[in-house]
Amino acid sequence: MIRYANPSDHPAIHALVTAAFTRPDEAALVERLRADGDSMFELVEIIEDALVGHILFSRMWADSLNLYAALAPVSVHPDLQRRGTGGRLVRAGLEAAKEFGAAAVIVLGHPGYYPRFGFTTAAAQNLKCAYSGLPAFMAITLEPGGLDQPLTVVYPDAFGI
């Protein structure tokens, strides 16, 4: 079952993200995004009452009236990786981002993983930010015309860039 995360999930999310990345950095990022009010939404996957996956979408700042989202991080319990949890969370997250009114979602992620969900470097070609031009810097348009014009986007302060 995939659902929106709630505050009572936060300790389990912290433990999961730390385990998934084998370090606390990404879990600290999640906490900073929440504390700064930059988390747009978080989803979790629950299997047999255990929280096994988590994804966070945060607001990006842009020189546009449209809303843009950053996808990061995606975390799956180490024992369950490569079994579809991450993909289910990304797909559900993209649908939720549409419902939140995001014109596009931007990710700095593995170039071999995110294109299966529709992310491309071509969609990000009009975006100017610290990661522009990198193979890992990709985007997906959720609304027609969402990325057609040149646009400067800024990650939330929690990302430290």
Image (spheres, rainbow, N blue to C red):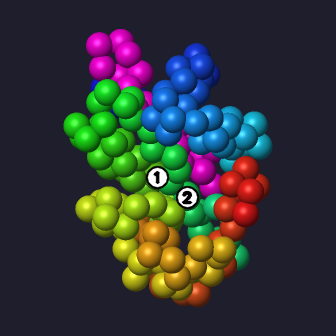
- The residue located at (39%, 35%) in the rendering is 76
What residue did someone put label 2 on? 69
Residue 126 position within the rendered picture, expressed as x and y whole percent measured from the top left: 53, 85
**Which of the two labelled residues, at mark 2 and mark 1, occupies the earlier sequence position?**
2
Specify the quadrant that holds the N terminus.
Answer: top left
- The tag on residue 14 is none
Question: Closer to the camera, 45 or 144?
Answer: 45
* Local crowd size for mark 1, using a 10 Å CA cut-off: few (<14), some (14–19), many (≥20): many
Say which residue label 1 marks.
97
Residue 159 appears in the figure:
yes
Location of residue 15 with respect to 149 vertically, above or below: above
| Residue numbers of the magenta segment | 39-59
Main SS type for the magenta part? Answer: strand
Disc number lying in front (2 or 1): 2
Kindly state the secondary structure of the residue where label 2 is placed. strand
- Residue 151 location, x and y as percent? 62, 81
